[in-house]
Image (tube, rainbow, N blue to C red):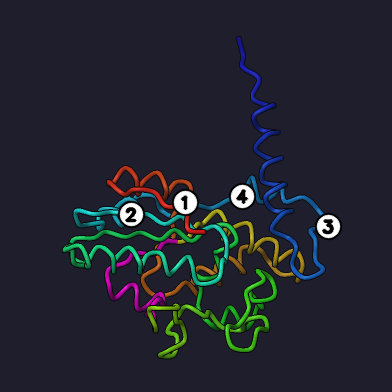
Amino acid sequence: MKKDNQPQLNQRRTFLKQFATGAAVLGAGIISSPLQSVAADISLPDVSDADVWFNKVKGKHRMVFDVTQPHEIFPFAWPKVFLLTNAATGSPEKDCGVVVILRHNAIPYAMGNPLWEKYKFGEMFKINDEASKTPATQNPFWQPKPGTFKAPGIGEVKIGIDELQASGVMFCACDMALTVFSAVVAENTKQDAAAVKKEWLAGLLPGVQPVPSGIWAVGRAQEHGCSYCFAS
């Protein structure tokens, strides 16, 4: 008997439509038409590349930080705390494997300053500059100036993405979120969705690995021995 797959197809399209609609609060811009075409044309990165990347996770103590929202300094402070407190208990950085997954509304952190300036990610994702308290025009966690981030009782904390990478922290970005958000921007700015996504992929920070989805990466990280931490 032929199986009717229409309910599953409708559920998939409904999910993507809701996801895209939720992502579309770009200032005053809300998607005027459903992104069902995006559902049909989603292009995923080479899964084998991402799987090979996860083989780089090393160390006895492994943690994956699941970052879904731009929540002040916490998505980047917790990986640093993990490294510092392991060091304090006799486990240096070389014994620690840390993966940070940037997905959903945290996706702009995976991209460089030119894209922040062009697409106004600070306004789009409600991310403010720490000093001016106005929408950020640059990625605040990429090559921050010395002394930018401080914690009470601790002092300066080096939690820039580049600084964490130097300590062995691995960063990846959700391709599903890149697909949907770039399509939202293209819809609202009358651009070609494929061209915008290509530009965003080209603008990923050095060392940031695109993965098919953030959820996929959560699973892979745990398969490679990482404990899970929701970075909020």
Residues under numbered marks 1 and 4 in contact, where contact means CB atoms less than 8 Å apart: no
**Percent x, y of residue 80:** 35, 69
Query: Few, some or many C-alpha atoms within 10 Å of disc 2 (few <14, some 14-19, many ≥20)?
Result: many
Residue at the (56%, 83%) spot, across then down: 138
* Residue, disc 2: 63
**Percent x, y of residue 100:** 40, 61
Q: State the CA–CA distance, disc 4 to disc 2.
A: 33 Å
Nearest to viewer (mark 3 / mark 2)? 2
**Percent x, y of residue 172:** 42, 61
Marks 3 and 1, the one that precedes in the sequence? 3
Q: State the CA–CA distance, disc 3 to disc 1.
A: 27 Å
Query: Few, some or many C-alpha atoms within 10 Å of disc 3 (few <14, some 14-19, many ≥20)?
Result: few
The magenta region covers 156-172
* Residue, disc 3: 32
Residue 104 within the magenta-colored segment of the rendering: no
Nearest to viewer (mark 1 / mark 4)? 1
Query: Few, some or many C-alpha atoms within 10 Å of disc 4 (few <14, some 14-19, many ≥20)?
Result: few
Q: Using residue 105 as the reference point, say whether residue 25 is left or right of it.
A: right
* Residue, disc 4: 41
Residue at the (71%, 40%) spot, across then down: 14
Q: Using residue 127 as the reference point, say whether residue 111 is left or right of it.
A: left
Using the image as rendered, state which of residue 85 and residue 140 is in the foreground.
85
**SS label for mark 1:** loop
Residues under numbered marks 3 and 4 in contact, where contact means CB atoms less than 8 Å apart: no
Nearest to viewer (mark 4 / mark 2)? 2
Q: State the CA–CA distance, disc 1 to disc 2.
A: 20 Å
